[in-house]
Amino acid sequence: MIVMSDTIERIKCLIIGSGPAGYTAAIYAARADLKPVVYTGMEPGGQLTTTTEVDNFPGYPEGVDGPTMMVHLQQQAERFGTEVRIGMVTAVEFSNEVGGIHKVTVDNNKPIEAETVIISTGASAKYLGLPSEQRLRGGGVSACAVCDGFFYKGQEVAIVGGGDTAAEEATYLAKLCTKVTMLVRGGQMRASKAMQHRVNSTPNIEVHYHTEVDEVLGDQVVEGLRMVNRQTGEKEEIAITGLFIAIGHKPNTDIFKGQIDMDEVGYILTHGKSTKTNKHGVFACGDAQDKEYRQAVTAAGTGCMAALDAERYLASID
Ligand code: NDP
């Protein structure tokens, strides 16, 4: 529900979310004098703040830890006049008109009006929810093989999931690791036939069907895994140093449901190669609209696009 008030703040460019997409949008929007305001959301800095080393973002030859990189991005956005506010957008009512004003509520009580809105709320990796898995997150349990696989070079790891992400990440890990054990909970993979073929023709990937994680073993770091066969109930322990969870992501777009066009999972649909949504003046970037690439650098790229799209939109209605 949108809360009304007598003195409602009007913002030219409101950015919802503070990951690489949001901050890159802010850098561009601030330099274009759109006076952007970023609302950080519940996890200021986004998913990268839960990552240790980031080695694949261009411009950091020695690598950088995720939280530091997000502080850098925030500082760069602020240097050009972005206002970063801690707060959660809790409701939206987007206009259907060209040049219409979008109504947004922050923290359930603060109404705001915005001429343009850039949605960069990201996505969250799904986890199994086992206590041992949660305890060892950052200690060998990861939801991103491309981010963390390198640290397991020459070691034995396991991956959970049977979709395209799991298949792709298993083959990625197989190039780095001596052995990859893949746990698929059903009798077959959901991944495309081509991806399944790649998995099955990689000699150091061992697929276990009808198999789930019973417990992740290790005190401070992952030392092994106890698997359970769902059909027979049989349990087996293997020694591994890394466990990758690849059971899907959930875009953080629930508050936009009914307002913005999205696919059945909740990824926001954008028009053609732009970041335009079905609402005039509302743009989406980063993982909230990308289930394919999901990298910090691709999120940053679409953040830049969203700011340029917002700037052009404002110029066109002036
Ligand atoms: P998906 O939802 O496609 O697959 C999730 C997988 O995880 C399924 O095998 C599912 O099993 C399994 N799973 C879900 N929950 C659990 C659980 N609690 N325990 C064990 N296993 C579980 O997610 P993806 O991230 O793989 O893919 C998302 C989308 O992105 C898809 O449309 C995919 O095609 C696309 N994609 C495309 C790529 C490409 O084309 N190169 C690369 C990566 C993704 P079950 O099947 O039994 O439900």
Image (cartoon, helix red, strand yellow):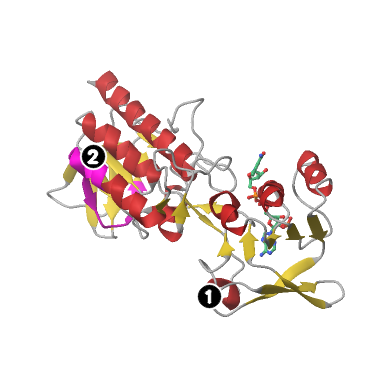
View extreme (bottom): residue = 219
Can residue 144 be seen here? The reply is no
Name above or below for residue 222 compared with residue 266: below
Mark 2 close to ligand 1, CB under 8 Å: no
* Drawn side of residue 28 relative to residue 221, left or right: left
Who is closer to the viewer here, 168 or 204?
204
Q: Residue at x 34, y 47 (%)?
A: 16
Quick one: label 1, few (<14), some, or many (20+) residues within 10 Å? some
The C terminus sits in image quarter:
top left
Quick one: label 2, few (<14), some, or many (20+) residues within 10 Å? many
Indicate the amino acid at tag 1: Arg
**Residue 86, position in %: x, y?**
26, 57
Name above or below for residue 119 compared with residue 46: above
Element type where label 2 sits in the image: loop
View extreme (left): residue = 7
Indicate the amino acid at tag 2: Pro
Q: CA distance from mark 2 to mark 1?
A: 38 Å
Can residue 186 be seen here? The reply is yes
Mark 1 close to ligand 1, CB under 8 Å: no
